[in-house]
Image: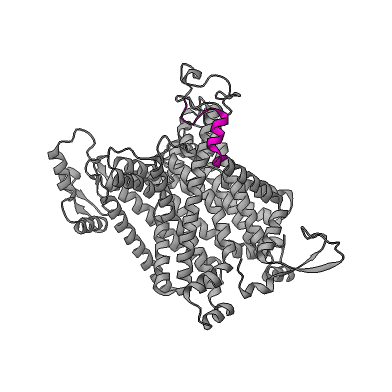
Amino acid sequence: MSLSPVDGAALAEIESGGEAGGATGAPQGRRVVGRSPGQLAWLRLRRDRTALISGAMLVLFVLVALAAPLIELVYGIGPRDQFQHKLDGFSMPLGYAGGVSGEHFFGLEPRTGRDIFIRLVYGLRTSLFIAFAAAVLTAAIGVVLGALAGYLGGWLDAVVNWITDLTLALPFLVIALALTPTLTLRFYGQRDAVPPAFGIGVLIAIFAVFGWTSTARLVRGQVIALREREFVEAARASGAGLGHMLFRQLLPNTWAPILVSFSLAVPQFITSEAALSFIGVGLTEETPSFGRMIYQSLDYLQTGPAFVFFPGVTIFALVFAFNLFGDALRDALDPKSSR
Amino acid sequence: MLRFLVKRILSAVLTLFAVTVLTFLMFFALPRDPVTGMCPKNCNPERLERVRQELGLRDPLVSQYAGYMKGIVTGRDLGSAQGGRCDAPCLGWSYVNNEAVTDTMARVLPVTLSIVIPAAILWLLLGVGLGMLSALRRGTWLDRVAIGFSLAGASMQLYFVGAVLLLVFVYTLRWLPVPGYTSLFDDPVRWASGLVLAWVSLAFLFSAIYARLFRAQMLETLSEDFVRTARAKGLTRTRVYGRHALRAAITPVVTVAGLDVGAALGGTVITETTFGIRGLGRTAVDAVRAGDLPTIMATVLIAAVFVVLANVLVDLLYAAIDPRVRLG
């Protein structure tokens, strides 16, 4: 990790030897250990129980999403398999709690008779992929434009600011709802079969277009605060180019808030994807998705509450883990925090 | 002060102007002919052509846009098929609803206001109260419970919370009627009982964010010199925390609240869908589905107006709350 001179002063931290994680030799008395902000943050994160638990949960979620086809193989049921013979005369699953059994861990969907567990596993895959892709894109666009706007100022700053105001003023859900079919029609026309990947791509693009402004505003503020500092001036005086100024001098000093905003953006995109699927845009029926499942399940609120319960709790656990981890990360990266 | 106000309002007007242009382009660039959505069934070519003429879709885009804007400012004549004279603010005629869009908006706007305003009061009180409590009792079990509650609330999905509330209070216990909107002036009790679930679920989700934000801000403020000074000169705890610290810590809450309330007034799509209440958000979604162009334009525009207005208000409130802020 590259560090600018300004961090040099903040490197030293006095700690009693017994606490220093991973220190081997026999420690006596107090000693001064030099640590980079990154090391400090990592140390704090490792000591934080909440961070460990939520981090482990996230790893588990990601693994499940990555291994979805493998799980399907072991579980023996695919996301599109239907079990009509296990539904009663009203198309409701037989058995207790929506048909929970050793064969169907979370029961069956009413009417279609699809297995809820495997659809959730695949829904997780869709959600996480969309959220991560959108978060990476928004972070990239936001960081570059925000840093440029903050550093250069002038008309670029004015334009970026104004676009930010504009995107805030547009009702996101309505615009996304209107744009998705428009874009689909543009590329595929009325009758063509639209591949599921296209729907996912459109969603990511819409998130990126609407999402980058918040990162840009954050980075811009940070860069403006740093712009007049001595080390920046020194670099400028020694003839550093724009690229060097941005990527070697300014951005390394803003990575902490960027990382935090990234980790909090992912759950936001998961929620937005679910919300969009909930009002019926975005993904096609064959792509398993949390929001679509919840939307369909609301019709069975009185008759089959288990169908509402499982997707709702899963998405809650996922977003909760992300929020806990993001919060812990913020604490760990905060130079003022004493934890 | 005056200069700031003028500058702020000018930029707000500019933003609104851009919103109208963008929306106009976005929806007129629809590959789908905007007219087919406007006469749903058994439309013969002649009728389609007539609708096209009446809507002025044969005119160049610029003059269509100019006509639309003129309608908002001064009103205009729309022709007999569209209800004739349309007074300012004229938002056009919807062939889907067979009604002037301004009338539709006048009908659904009170619904969204009735959902958002009480909910916002509830979530601000709850959020700031919880945040204050956990900041003053930092490190105790109370703090931990409040933080847990706020993180859980921030991770909840409105449709899930709403579904659970509906199941418990409406379908199982039958304490509340099925959610719906009755005018406050007709029957205040039915108004409240039909909307209370929407308020509670919105407040639960939003207050969580505010509690977290306010707690962090309050803790930072409490470590500042002026708080110590105020305590040292003998002011009571209540006075220092309730007056001095609260005023300094609440500014970021005001910013976020302004944005949230502004956005929510533009239509609480998810809430309205979950509880089946037809406000601005639901109307917008239905209009998009039906390709009802004038209604879409109107909802987007109203939503933008709320957000822009909220932003201006926040800036002004800032100066009123925090004496350190100088407008300029």
Q: Position of residue B108 (x, y in %)?
A: 36, 44
Q: Residue furthest top?
A: A89
- A115 with respect to B182 (left or right): right
Q: Position of residue B137 (x, y in %)?
A: 72, 54
Residue B229 is covered by the magenta coloring: no
- B195 with respect to B68 (left or right): right
Foreground residue among B55 and A57: A57
Residue B174 in sight here: no
Kindly identify the residue that appears in the image at 51 percent across and 60 percent down.
Answer: B255
Q: Residue furthest left?
A: B46
- Quadrant for residue A188, please give it: top left
Vertical order, B218 against B84 (above or below): below
Q: Position of residue A208 (x, y in %)?
A: 43, 54
The boundaries of the magenta stretch are: A64-81
Kindly identify the residue that appears in the image at 45 percent across and 50 percent down.
Answer: B264
Foreground residue among A49 and B228: A49
Image quarter hosting the N terminus of chain B: bottom left
Kindly identify the residue that appears in the image at 43 percent across and 50 percent down.
Answer: A204
